[in-house]
Amino acid sequence: MTTFDEREQAFERKFIYDEEVRFKALARRNKRLGLWTAERIGLKGSDAESYAKALVAIDLRQHDESEIATKVRDDLQAVGASTSEPEIRQLMHELLAKAIEEIKNGR
C-alpha cells in the first residue's frame, strides 16, 4: 500500500467519522430543542418525549432545519409564547455546538 492509498483511507475514515458525529449531533439537538419547546408549551412526561421525537423525525425525513424552526415557532405562538424564528435558530445553533462537543468527548 502506498502513502497515497493510506492518506486516502485516512480521509475516508475522517469523513465517515464526521458524518456520524453530525448525524448524532443533529438528532441530539432536535431532541433537546423538542424538550425545551415542550416545556414551554406545557407538555410533560411522555407527551414531551413524543414531541421531541417528532422533531427528530422531521429532520430524518426531510433534513430541513427551517421546517423545524417554523414548527417550534408556530407551536410556541399557539400558546402565546413570543419567540422569534431568529431566536429559535440561535438556540438550535447553540444546542448543536453543545451536542457535537459532548459526542466528541464521549458523552
Image: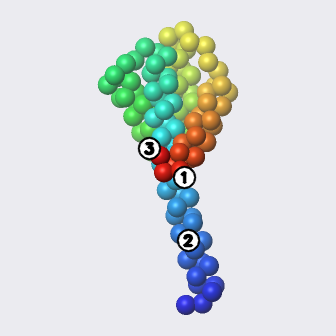
Please give the label number shown on residue 43. Answer: none
**Location of residue 30 in the rendering, given as x and y in whole percent from the top left corner:** 49, 36
N-term-proximal mark, 2 vs 1: 2
Residue found at the very far bottom of the displayed protein:
1
* Mark 1 → mark 3, Cα distance in angstroms: 25 Å
Helix, strand or loop status at disc 1: helix
Helix, strand or loop status at disc 3: helix
Helix, strand or loop status at disc 2: helix
**Location of residue 70 in the rendering, given as x and y in whole percent from the top left corner:** 56, 27
Residue closest to the eye, 58 or 103: 103
Q: Amino acid at mark 2?
A: Glu
User: Label 3, on which residue?
Assistant: 61
Mark in the foreground, 2 or 1 = 1
Residue closest to the eye, 91 or 67: 91
User: Label 1, on which residue?
Assistant: 104
N-term-proximal mark, 1 vs 3: 3
| Quadrant hosting residue 91 | top right
N-term-proximal mark, 3 vs 2: 2
Q: Amino acid at mark 1?
A: Lys
From the viewer's perspective, is 90 left or right of 69? right
* Mark 2 → mark 1, Cα distance in angstroms: 18 Å
* Mark 3 → mark 2, Cα distance in angstroms: 26 Å
User: Label 2, on which residue?
Assistant: 12
